[in-house]
Image: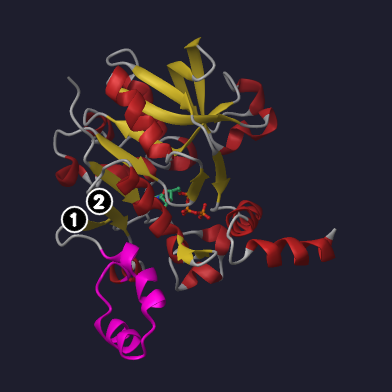
Amino acid sequence: MVKTIRKAVLPVAGLGTRFLPATKSIPKEMLPLVDKPLIQYAIDEARDAGIQEFCLITGRGKDSLIDYFDIAYELEATLKERGKLTTLEALKPSSLTAGSLMAVRQQEPLGLGHAIWCARAFIGDDPFAIILPDDVVKSNKSCVSQLVDIYNQTGGNVIAVTEVLPEHTNRYGILDIGADDGKLVEVKGLVEKPKPELAPSNLSVIGRYILNADILTHLSKLERGAGNEIQLTDAMAKMIGNTPFHGLRYEGKRYDCGDKAGFLEAQIAFSIDRPDLGPDVKQFLKNYY
Ligand code: UTP
């Protein structure tokens, strides 16, 4: 019997330099994808997978992320008074059960691995999910739910993976793979941002993981890797061979919302499907090609 996944860690302490100047005073994760901030998509995805405990790894200037999940008494009272009940409904997903959200400060952005290590008190001995809010996955079943389903069968560690262009391997964590049934792959090795000529494959990790608490033992060594950062990929690589480790080619499409072009594409993809926006979006897009 594997332990149930009840916890999710959401690292949001990065500097978001690719979106400057917008991210000078607004966290990247508060930027809206259509009409919801990126962080809301991440929380919704976790909840879809039955996860009810969340830990945000924040940094300086990121407090608006915590405020976002608070009750907005004045706003709610005004909307009620004005009879704007549909608008009031839109606020519901941002209200979390009392005590279900924790926030930990990563004082310095020393890397994703370091951010996860900062959540060690929250994680304890439990397996947990990691969701990077700037990776948004559009799918029929939430990507984290898909990972949890596999984890319930295999135990160990399960990460979401996707093929990238061979010339782009130096942007991602890349897998060395063993057995592969087309959907689930055995992870034999992991390398952070290898040059295309050194990459063991073009299968890349995306920002969705189910990991065993043993990762903390490796992260606690605080070893620096690519870019002189404490890399999650390096710590994951050290767990290979000790417990089952699988990559899942999930159903759905990932949008890299940490990248300008990726974020713009996501705006189109998420608005074109909406009954209230789709027809207008399709119409105006015709003016641009
Ligand atoms: P990115 O590599 O996208 O970095 O981080 P970034 O700082 O957010 O953005 P750019 O590259 O400067 O534009 C991937 C994820 O890891 C988190 C980020 O918040 C993001 O969710 N992260 C990264 C941390 O929480 N702490 C870190 O030290 C580094």
Near-viewer residue (95 or 82): 82
Left or right: where does residue 92 sit relative to residue 260? left
Q: Is residue 231 among what the camera can see?
A: no
The local secondary structure at tag 1 comes to loop
Give amino acid for label 1.
Answer: Ser
Q: Main secondary structure of the magenta part?
A: helix
Near-viewer residue (132 or 285): 285
Q: Is residue 176 among what the camera can see?
A: yes
Near-viewer residue (195 or 223): 195
Residue 213 is situated, as x and y percent measured from the top left of the image, at 21, 31
Q: Residue at x 18, y 55 (%)?
A: 100
> Residue 238: which quarter of the image?
top left
Q: Are the residues tagged 1 and 2 within 8 Å (C-beta)?
A: yes
Residue 157 is situated, as x and y percent measured from the top left of the image, at 32, 25
Specify which label sits upstream in the sequence, 1 or 2.
2
Asked if ligand 1 lies within 8 A of label 2, the reply is no
Q: Which residues are magenta?
A: 68-95
Disc 2 packing (10 Å; few <14; some 14–19; many ≥20): many
Taking 118 as reference, is 241 above or below it?
above
Q: Residue at x 17, y 46 (%)?
A: 122
The local secondary structure at tag 2 comes to strand
Left or right: where does residue 156 sit relative to residue 137? left
* Residue 83: in magenta span: yes
Disc 1 packing (10 Å; few <14; some 14–19; many ≥20): few
Label 1 sits on residue: 100
Q: Give the quarter of the figure containing the N terminus.
A: top left
Residue 57 is situated, as x and y percent measured from the top left of the image, at 30, 54
Label 2 sits on residue: 54
